[in-house]
Amino acid sequence: MADRLKGKVALVTGGASGIGRAGSLLMAKEGARIVVADIDATRAEAVAQEIRSSGGDAFGCTVDVRDSASVQAMVAASVERFGRIDVLFHNAVSVPLVNKHDRRITELPEETWHAILGLVLTGTFLTAKYVAQRMLEQRSGSIVLTATVDALIGQAGLDAYTAAKGGVVAMTRSMAAGLSPEGVRVNAICPGFVRTPHQDIFLSDEKQRATIESLHLMGIMDPEEVAAFALFLASDEARSMTGGIHVVDSGYTAFKANMDPVAVFKR
Ligand SMILES: NC(=O)c1ccc[n+]([C@@H]2O[C@H](COP(=O)([O-])OP(=O)(O)OC[C@H]3O[C@@H](n4cnc5c(N)ncnc54)[C@H](O)[C@@H]3O)[C@@H](O)[C@H]2O)c1
Protein backbone atom coordinates (compact mmCIF):
# COMPACT_ATOMS: atom_id res chain seq x y z
CA MET A 1 0.00 0.00 0.00
CA ALA A 2 1.24 3.47 -0.84
CA ASP A 3 -0.19 6.59 0.74
CA ARG A 4 -0.98 9.33 -1.79
CA LEU A 5 -4.64 9.23 -0.65
CA LYS A 6 -4.05 8.05 2.91
CA GLY A 7 -7.00 8.86 5.19
CA LYS A 8 -9.24 9.93 2.30
CA VAL A 9 -12.56 8.53 1.15
CA ALA A 10 -13.09 8.24 -2.61
CA LEU A 11 -16.49 7.76 -4.21
CA VAL A 12 -16.09 6.32 -7.71
CA THR A 13 -19.14 6.19 -9.96
CA GLY A 14 -19.08 3.70 -12.81
CA GLY A 15 -16.65 1.96 -10.47
CA ALA A 16 -17.59 -1.55 -11.59
CA SER A 17 -15.94 -1.39 -15.01
CA GLY A 18 -13.32 0.22 -17.23
CA ILE A 19 -11.87 3.55 -16.12
CA GLY A 20 -13.92 3.65 -12.89
CA ARG A 21 -12.78 0.16 -11.90
CA ALA A 22 -9.14 1.06 -12.59
CA GLY A 23 -9.61 4.25 -10.52
CA SER A 24 -11.18 2.34 -7.62
CA LEU A 25 -8.33 -0.18 -7.51
CA LEU A 26 -5.58 2.44 -7.86
CA MET A 27 -7.03 4.85 -5.29
CA ALA A 28 -7.45 1.96 -2.86
CA LYS A 29 -3.81 0.99 -3.42
CA GLU A 30 -2.90 4.57 -2.49
CA GLY A 31 -4.67 4.30 0.85
CA ALA A 32 -8.19 5.62 0.16
CA ARG A 33 -11.32 3.92 1.41
CA ILE A 34 -13.50 3.39 -1.65
CA VAL A 35 -17.20 3.53 -2.42
CA VAL A 36 -17.55 1.54 -5.63
CA ALA A 37 -20.80 3.01 -6.97
CA ASP A 38 -22.48 1.56 -10.04
CA ILE A 39 -25.85 0.61 -11.47
CA ASP A 40 -24.50 -2.96 -11.68
CA ALA A 41 -24.59 -4.04 -8.03
CA THR A 42 -22.94 -7.43 -8.54
CA ARG A 43 -19.91 -6.10 -10.40
CA ALA A 44 -19.57 -3.14 -8.02
CA GLU A 45 -19.43 -5.51 -5.07
CA ALA A 46 -16.92 -7.71 -6.93
CA VAL A 47 -14.56 -4.72 -7.31
CA ALA A 48 -15.05 -3.83 -3.63
CA GLN A 49 -14.28 -7.45 -2.70
CA GLU A 50 -11.11 -7.31 -4.83
CA ILE A 51 -10.02 -4.23 -2.84
CA ARG A 52 -10.79 -5.87 0.51
CA SER A 53 -8.89 -9.01 -0.54
CA SER A 54 -5.80 -6.85 -1.09
CA GLY A 55 -6.09 -5.35 2.39
CA GLY A 56 -8.06 -2.22 1.50
CA ASP A 57 -11.46 -0.99 2.65
CA ALA A 58 -14.37 -0.66 0.21
CA PHE A 59 -18.02 -1.39 -0.31
CA GLY A 60 -20.19 -1.73 -3.38
CA CYS A 61 -23.03 0.79 -3.62
CA THR A 62 -25.87 0.52 -6.11
CA VAL A 63 -26.73 3.81 -7.77
CA ASP A 64 -28.51 5.11 -10.83
CA VAL A 65 -26.97 8.53 -11.41
CA ARG A 66 -30.03 9.62 -13.43
CA ASP A 67 -32.15 9.46 -10.31
CA SER A 68 -31.91 12.12 -7.60
CA ALA A 69 -33.15 9.91 -4.75
CA SER A 70 -30.70 7.17 -5.70
CA VAL A 71 -27.78 9.64 -5.81
CA GLN A 72 -28.75 11.10 -2.44
CA ALA A 73 -28.96 7.58 -0.97
CA MET A 74 -25.44 6.86 -2.32
CA VAL A 75 -24.06 9.99 -0.63
CA ALA A 76 -25.84 9.11 2.63
CA ALA A 77 -24.53 5.51 2.53
CA SER A 78 -20.97 6.73 1.87
CA VAL A 79 -21.07 9.15 4.80
CA GLU A 80 -22.72 6.60 7.07
CA ARG A 81 -20.02 4.02 6.31
CA PHE A 82 -16.90 6.19 6.10
CA GLY A 83 -17.89 9.51 7.72
CA ARG A 84 -16.87 11.79 4.83
CA ILE A 85 -16.24 12.06 1.06
CA ASP A 86 -12.94 13.58 -0.02
CA VAL A 87 -12.86 12.55 -3.66
CA LEU A 88 -15.49 12.09 -6.35
CA PHE A 89 -14.28 10.33 -9.51
CA HIS A 90 -17.33 10.37 -11.76
CA ASN A 91 -17.42 7.95 -14.70
CA ALA A 92 -20.91 6.46 -14.86
CA VAL A 93 -22.10 6.18 -18.45
CA SER A 94 -23.78 3.47 -20.48
CA VAL A 95 -21.29 3.09 -23.30
CA PRO A 96 -23.66 0.81 -25.31
CA LEU A 97 -26.38 3.50 -25.16
CA VAL A 98 -23.97 6.00 -26.70
CA ASN A 99 -22.25 3.68 -29.18
CA LYS A 100 -25.40 2.01 -30.47
CA HIS A 101 -27.98 4.80 -30.35
CA ASP A 102 -26.31 8.20 -30.77
CA ARG A 103 -26.53 9.65 -34.31
CA ARG A 104 -25.82 12.79 -36.31
CA ILE A 105 -28.41 15.42 -35.54
CA THR A 106 -30.73 14.81 -38.50
CA GLU A 107 -31.21 11.12 -37.62
CA LEU A 108 -31.02 11.51 -33.83
CA PRO A 109 -34.31 10.46 -32.20
CA GLU A 110 -35.49 12.94 -29.60
CA GLU A 111 -35.81 10.18 -27.01
CA THR A 112 -32.14 9.23 -27.54
CA TRP A 113 -31.12 12.88 -27.08
CA HIS A 114 -33.04 13.02 -23.78
CA ALA A 115 -31.68 9.62 -22.64
CA ILE A 116 -28.05 10.61 -23.26
CA LEU A 117 -28.38 14.13 -21.84
CA GLY A 118 -30.23 12.65 -18.82
CA LEU A 119 -27.50 10.13 -18.13
CA VAL A 120 -24.36 12.09 -19.01
CA LEU A 121 -25.18 15.70 -18.16
CA THR A 122 -27.99 15.42 -15.59
CA GLY A 123 -26.19 12.41 -14.05
CA THR A 124 -23.11 14.57 -13.58
CA PHE A 125 -25.22 17.44 -12.21
CA LEU A 126 -26.96 15.25 -9.63
CA THR A 127 -23.83 13.41 -8.54
CA ALA A 128 -21.67 16.53 -8.28
CA LYS A 129 -24.46 18.50 -6.56
CA TYR A 130 -25.04 16.08 -3.68
CA VAL A 131 -21.38 15.14 -3.22
CA ALA A 132 -20.30 18.80 -3.31
CA GLN A 133 -22.86 19.71 -0.62
CA ARG A 134 -21.08 17.26 1.64
CA MET A 135 -17.65 18.58 0.62
CA LEU A 136 -18.70 22.17 1.39
CA GLU A 137 -19.53 21.09 4.96
CA GLN A 138 -16.03 19.58 5.20
CA ARG A 139 -14.54 22.66 3.50
CA SER A 140 -12.43 20.43 1.25
CA GLY A 141 -12.73 17.95 -1.59
CA SER A 142 -11.64 17.06 -5.10
CA ILE A 143 -14.13 16.35 -7.86
CA VAL A 144 -12.77 14.66 -10.99
CA LEU A 145 -15.21 14.34 -13.87
CA THR A 146 -14.46 12.10 -16.83
CA ALA A 147 -15.41 13.97 -20.02
CA THR A 148 -13.94 13.05 -23.44
CA VAL A 149 -11.92 14.51 -26.31
CA ASP A 150 -15.21 14.46 -28.24
CA ALA A 151 -16.22 17.47 -26.12
CA LEU A 152 -13.25 19.39 -27.52
CA ILE A 153 -13.13 18.42 -31.19
CA GLY A 154 -15.86 17.13 -33.49
CA GLN A 155 -16.88 13.51 -33.74
CA ALA A 156 -19.39 12.76 -36.48
CA GLY A 157 -22.41 10.72 -35.42
CA LEU A 158 -22.21 11.43 -31.69
CA ASP A 159 -24.15 14.67 -31.46
CA ALA A 160 -25.92 13.92 -28.14
CA TYR A 161 -22.80 12.55 -26.41
CA THR A 162 -20.60 15.46 -27.53
CA ALA A 163 -23.24 17.98 -26.41
CA ALA A 164 -23.62 16.30 -23.02
CA LYS A 165 -19.88 15.99 -22.40
CA GLY A 166 -19.40 19.56 -23.67
CA GLY A 167 -21.82 20.54 -20.92
CA VAL A 168 -19.70 18.62 -18.41
CA VAL A 169 -16.60 20.54 -19.56
CA ALA A 170 -18.36 23.91 -19.24
CA MET A 171 -19.80 22.96 -15.83
CA THR A 172 -16.34 21.95 -14.62
CA ARG A 173 -15.13 25.54 -14.94
CA SER A 174 -18.19 27.20 -13.40
CA MET A 175 -18.33 24.68 -10.54
CA ALA A 176 -14.62 25.20 -9.89
CA ALA A 177 -15.19 28.95 -9.61
CA GLY A 178 -18.28 28.54 -7.45
CA LEU A 179 -16.90 25.95 -5.04
CA SER A 180 -13.38 27.31 -4.57
CA PRO A 181 -14.23 29.59 -1.59
CA GLU A 182 -14.90 26.47 0.50
CA GLY A 183 -11.78 24.65 -0.74
CA VAL A 184 -13.48 22.27 -3.15
CA ARG A 185 -11.63 21.64 -6.43
CA VAL A 186 -13.19 20.51 -9.71
CA ASN A 187 -11.32 19.18 -12.75
CA ALA A 188 -12.24 17.27 -15.88
CA ILE A 189 -10.26 14.64 -17.75
CA CYS A 190 -10.78 14.25 -21.49
CA PRO A 191 -9.57 10.80 -22.54
CA GLY A 192 -9.02 9.69 -26.11
CA PHE A 193 -9.92 6.10 -27.01
CA VAL A 194 -9.46 3.84 -24.00
CA ARG A 195 -9.40 0.04 -24.12
CA THR A 196 -12.44 -0.73 -21.93
CA PRO A 197 -14.83 -3.72 -22.24
CA HIS A 198 -17.50 -2.09 -24.42
CA GLN A 199 -14.88 -0.52 -26.73
CA ASP A 200 -13.46 -3.93 -27.65
CA ILE A 201 -15.95 -4.16 -30.49
CA PHE A 202 -14.01 -1.44 -32.34
CA LEU A 203 -10.67 -3.15 -31.76
CA SER A 204 -11.79 -6.56 -33.02
CA ASP A 205 -12.47 -5.00 -36.45
CA GLU A 206 -9.07 -4.69 -38.18
CA LYS A 207 -9.97 -1.60 -40.24
CA GLN A 208 -11.49 0.26 -37.28
CA ARG A 209 -8.58 -0.69 -35.09
CA ALA A 210 -6.05 0.64 -37.63
CA THR A 211 -7.95 3.95 -37.88
CA ILE A 212 -8.14 4.35 -34.11
CA GLU A 213 -4.46 3.48 -33.74
CA SER A 214 -3.50 6.02 -36.41
CA LEU A 215 -5.28 8.76 -34.42
CA HIS A 216 -3.38 8.05 -31.18
CA LEU A 217 0.30 9.01 -31.34
CA MET A 218 1.43 6.79 -28.45
CA GLY A 219 -1.00 3.93 -29.06
CA ILE A 220 -4.40 3.06 -27.62
CA MET A 221 -4.60 3.76 -23.90
CA ASP A 222 -5.46 1.46 -21.03
CA PRO A 223 -7.91 2.53 -18.27
CA GLU A 224 -5.04 2.54 -15.77
CA GLU A 225 -3.45 5.52 -17.58
CA VAL A 226 -6.57 7.65 -17.08
CA ALA A 227 -6.86 6.42 -13.49
CA ALA A 228 -3.28 7.52 -12.80
CA PHE A 229 -4.10 11.08 -13.79
CA ALA A 230 -7.34 11.02 -11.78
CA LEU A 231 -5.33 9.88 -8.76
CA PHE A 232 -3.02 12.89 -9.14
CA LEU A 233 -5.98 15.31 -9.39
CA ALA A 234 -7.61 13.64 -6.39
CA SER A 235 -4.49 13.92 -4.24
CA ASP A 236 -3.08 16.89 -2.35
CA GLU A 237 -0.24 16.99 -4.90
CA ALA A 238 -2.78 18.84 -7.09
CA ARG A 239 -3.99 21.08 -4.23
CA SER A 240 -3.93 24.26 -6.37
CA MET A 241 -5.33 22.71 -9.53
CA THR A 242 -8.96 23.50 -10.23
CA GLY A 243 -11.12 24.31 -13.25
CA GLY A 244 -8.75 22.42 -15.53
CA ILE A 245 -9.79 20.51 -18.64
CA HIS A 246 -7.02 17.95 -18.97
CA VAL A 247 -6.52 15.89 -22.11
CA VAL A 248 -5.19 12.40 -21.48
CA ASP A 249 -5.43 11.28 -25.06
CA SER A 250 -2.25 9.76 -26.50
CA GLY A 251 -1.89 12.87 -28.66
CA TYR A 252 -5.36 12.58 -30.24
CA THR A 253 -6.04 16.34 -30.13
CA ALA A 254 -2.45 17.37 -30.92
CA PHE A 255 -2.38 16.90 -34.69
CA LYS A 256 -4.54 16.78 -37.79
CA ALA A 257 -2.68 14.17 -39.83
CA ASN A 258 0.54 12.21 -39.73
CA MET A 259 1.92 13.71 -42.96
CA ASP A 260 5.07 15.67 -43.71
CA PRO A 261 4.22 18.78 -45.82
CA VAL A 262 7.85 19.94 -45.77
CA ALA A 263 8.82 16.82 -47.72
CA VAL A 264 6.95 18.23 -50.77
CA PHE A 265 9.39 21.15 -51.00
CA LYS A 266 12.38 18.84 -50.76
CA ARG A 267 11.41 16.93 -53.92
N1 LIG B 1 -13.52 4.08 -23.06
C1 LIG B 1 -13.31 5.15 -23.79
O1 LIG B 1 -12.78 5.07 -24.93
C2 LIG B 1 -13.67 6.51 -23.26
C3 LIG B 1 -13.16 7.64 -23.93
C4 LIG B 1 -13.47 8.91 -23.45
C5 LIG B 1 -14.29 9.05 -22.34
N2 LIG B 1 -14.78 7.93 -21.72
C6 LIG B 1 -15.64 8.15 -20.55
O2 LIG B 1 -15.09 7.42 -19.47
C7 LIG B 1 -16.13 7.03 -18.57
C8 LIG B 1 -16.03 5.55 -18.29
O3 LIG B 1 -16.12 4.84 -19.51
P1 LIG B 1 -15.66 3.32 -19.63
O4 LIG B 1 -15.24 3.12 -21.03
O5 LIG B 1 -14.77 2.98 -18.53
O6 LIG B 1 -17.09 2.61 -19.47
P2 LIG B 1 -17.54 1.20 -18.84
O7 LIG B 1 -18.75 0.76 -19.59
O8 LIG B 1 -16.39 0.24 -18.77
O9 LIG B 1 -17.96 1.63 -17.37
C9 LIG B 1 -19.05 2.46 -17.15
C10 LIG B 1 -19.78 2.01 -15.89
O10 LIG B 1 -20.88 2.89 -15.65
C11 LIG B 1 -21.97 2.12 -15.18
N3 LIG B 1 -23.26 2.82 -15.40
C12 LIG B 1 -23.97 2.88 -16.56
N4 LIG B 1 -25.10 3.57 -16.36
C13 LIG B 1 -25.12 3.96 -15.05
C14 LIG B 1 -26.03 4.69 -14.25
N5 LIG B 1 -27.16 5.17 -14.77
N6 LIG B 1 -25.72 4.90 -12.94
C15 LIG B 1 -24.58 4.40 -12.41
N7 LIG B 1 -23.68 3.68 -13.13
C16 LIG B 1 -23.93 3.47 -14.43
C17 LIG B 1 -21.87 0.81 -15.94
O11 LIG B 1 -22.57 -0.24 -15.28
C18 LIG B 1 -20.36 0.59 -16.01
O12 LIG B 1 -19.92 -0.22 -14.93
C19 LIG B 1 -17.44 7.47 -19.23
O13 LIG B 1 -17.85 8.69 -18.68
C20 LIG B 1 -17.06 7.63 -20.70
O14 LIG B 1 -17.89 8.57 -21.34
C21 LIG B 1 -14.49 6.67 -22.14
Image (tube, grey):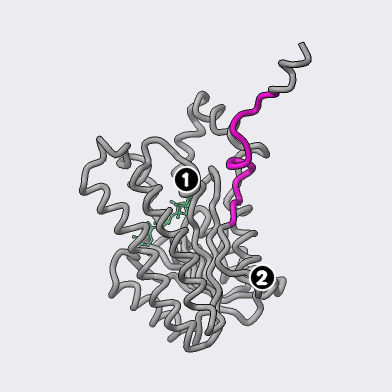
Question: How far separated are the C-alphas under marks 1 and 2?
Answer: 25 Å
The image quadrant where one finds ligand 1 is bottom left
Amino acid carrying label 1: it is Asp
Label 1, ligand 1: CB separation under 8 Å = yes
Q: Is residue 263 above or below residue 136?
A: above
Residue 203 location (% of width, % of height) = 51, 33
Label 2, on which residue? 238
- Give the class, few, some or many, for how many residues have Cα within 10 Å of label 1's Cα (few <14, many ≥20): many
**In the figure, is residue 145 to the left or right of 228?**
left
When the figure is inspected, residue 205 is found, relative to residue 179, above or below; the finding is above
| Image point (46%, 49%), residue name | 151
Q: Secondary structure at mark 2?
A: helix
Q: Is residue 167 something that shows in the picture?
A: yes
Asked whether 258 falls inside the magenta stretch, the response is yes
Q: What amino acid type should be assigned to the residue bearing mark 2?
A: Ala
Q: Earlier in the sequence, mark 1 or mark 2?
A: 1
Q: Residue at x 30, y 64 (%)?
A: 66
Question: In the rendering, at what x and y percent does residue 101 appear?
Answer: 30, 41
Q: Where is residue 202 drawn, in percent x and y?
A: 47, 34
Q: Which residues are magenta?
A: 246-260
Q: Which residue is mark 1?
A: 150
- If the image is split into quadrants, where does the C terminus sit? top right
Between 250 and 181, the one nearer to me in the picture: 181
- Percent across and percent down for residue 209 are 53, 30
Q: Are marks 1 and 2 in contact (CB under 8 Å)?
A: no
